Amino acid sequence: MPQVSEYAPGTPSWVDLATTDVEGAKTFYNAVFGWSYESVPGGEMEYETASLGQGPLAGIMPQPDEMRQMGAPPAWTTYVTVADVDATAAAASEAGGMVLQEPMDVMGILRMAILRDPTGGVVGVWKNDDSSGAAVVNEPGAFTWADLVTADVPAASDFYTGVLGWGATDMPDPQGNPSKMFTVNGAPVASARSLPNVPTHWAIYFAVADADRSAETVKAAGGQLMMEPFDTPPGRMFPAMDPAGAGFAAIQLDPDFDPTSA
């Protein structure tokens, strides 16, 4: 598997799961993606890094008490590498967003913040001085894409282009809904689209070798399919929930798909 050693500012570079059942999540994602785990020592809270054997690619941690008390479900969060966490958080506030977690240092190796865009999408930003982020991406079992589902794509696009410096271009949509492709230095890094009656959220995609086989594994491991696997231009995919209720998507990437020509 190719490894990633550096992420340009503005690039999604890490994902982690806040869940009510860490051990159950570890068992589930091991079955679905083949992850192994290592506990991060010395932190203020339990944190497990997931790996496919060539470096960390995701994290799992207990859902904070305040989230649980608010009734928030277990959820995955996408983190974007930035050059300056404090400046990004300030820019988010000025652009009409909200800083849910003020900039903070973690274990002396990274600085991070959690932001909410004006349409309700929650995203993390970080600067990691010890490692670049996920060591493996775009391979079976690893993170491959982040997609913002929102009722107001234009407002979200204005926010992220202003705060993260993303470029934005219109994407075709089969239903004619507003859709955007976000880019960094001309390279696609994320997208935004509108789906009727779906709450605003950042959807994360993991690559799999065989979507149909992975869908069966999800069900056998106690997860739930939101839709059976279906074909899209980037590949065959399905949305799912893990046993604790955290949503994610899996996609069998089409090696011939070119997102720049979509």
Image (spheres, rainbow, N blue to C red):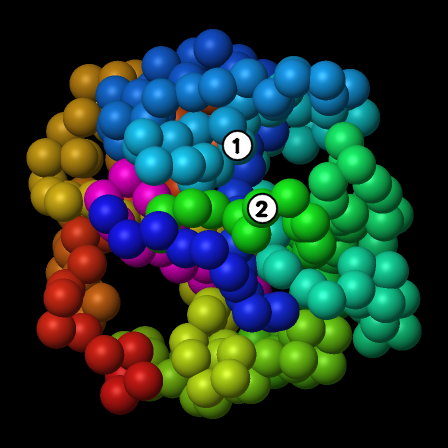
Kindly tell me whether residue 153 is visible in this rendering. yes
Above or below, comparing residue 53 to residue 166 in the picture:
above
Q: Is label 1 in a helix, a strand or a loop?
A: strand
- The numbered disc on residue 131 is 2
- Residue at 46 percent of width and 70 percent of height: 189
15 versus 23 height, above or below: below
Start and end of the magenta stretch? 138-152
Q: In percent of the image, x 75 and y 55: which residue is there?
A: 115
Please give the count of numbered marks on the rendered protein.
2
Q: Quadrant of the C terminus?
A: bottom left
- What is the three-letter code of the residue carrying label 2? Ser
Write the residue at 72% across / 17% down: 42
Q: Is residue 247 left or right of residue 175?
A: right
Q: Badge 1, how many Cα within 10 Å: few under 14, some, many 20+?
A: many
Residue 24: where, in percent of width, then height? 43, 12
Residue 162 picture quarter: bottom right
In the rendering, at what x and y percent does residue 39 appear? Answer: 55, 17
Identify which residue is drawn at 42% across, 80% down. Answer: 187
**Residue picked out by circle 1:** 59
Q: Classify residue 227 as left or right of residue 244.
A: left
Observer-nearest of 11 and 92? 11
Q: Residues within 10 Å of mark 2 (few under 14, many from 20)?
A: some
Residue 258 shows which numbered tag? none
